[in-house]
Amino acid sequence: MAKKAAGSSTDKINKVTGTVILISVKVIIYIIVALVFYYGITGAYQLGFTVFSKRTMTSAPGIEMRISVDEKDSVMDIGKTLEKMGLIHNAYAFVFQKYFYDIDVGPGIYTLNTAMTVKEALDAMDRDKQEEETEEQ
């Protein structure tokens, strides 16, 4: 009978330990999920703010810079170059707006200004608008 009591005590300890471990694992999972939501939501807000705001790097008159775009440059390459040069805040915002506004950025040498928004920079690099201006002249 003593063995049964000891076994019963061990079973209770195992049951309590299992419950504590299960609760601990659930708490850890909830914390991880909360952190993922927090960083995901704040990151999405920052990207949305960058994409839809009309922020410029500097106030007018700004600084003019020339950028050369090759045929082989991807949109992300151009965006990263503009970001490194200090012309835009975020390369991803540049890529998103390029596709959102359906702007055709082609090869060439462009003069951009730090007082331009991302949309204004894209408009300055729009191949379709350049062709229209050439036809008008």
Image (cartoon, grey):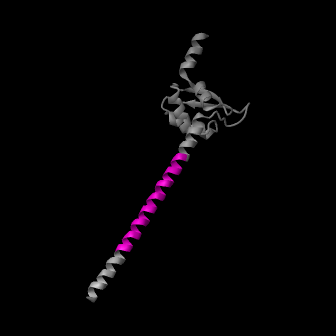
Where 36 falls versus 79 (above or below)? below
Q: In the figure, is residue 21 to the left or right of 89?
A: left
Quarter of the figure with residue 123: top right
Quadrant in which the C terminus is drawn: top right
In this figure, what is the number of numbered marks?
0
> Residue 2, image x and y in percent?
28, 89
Quadrant in which the N terminus is drawn: bottom left
Q: Residue at x 59, y 38 (%)?
A: 50
**Is 36 in the magenta?**
yes
Q: In the figure, is residue 114 to the left or right of 12?
A: right
Q: Residue at x 57, y 35 (%)?
A: 51
Compare residues 14 and 55 and report the one nearer the observer: 14
Where 115 falls versus 37 (above or below)? above
Q: Residue at x 62, y 27 (%)?
A: 120
Quarter of the figure with residue 14: bottom left
> Residue 35, image x and y in percent?
51, 54
Q: What's the magenta region? A: 15-41
Quarter of the figure with residue 54: top right
> Residue 78, image x and y in percent?
54, 34
**Is 18 in the magenta?**
yes
Compare residues 104 and 35 and report the one nearer the observer: 35
Say if residue 106 shows up in the picture. Answer: no
Residue furthest bottom as drawn: 2
Residue furthest right as drawn: 61
Q: Residue at x 58, y 28 (%)?
A: 122
Magenta stretch, main secondary structure class = helix
Say if residue 1 shows up in the picture. Answer: yes
Residue furthest top as drawn: 136
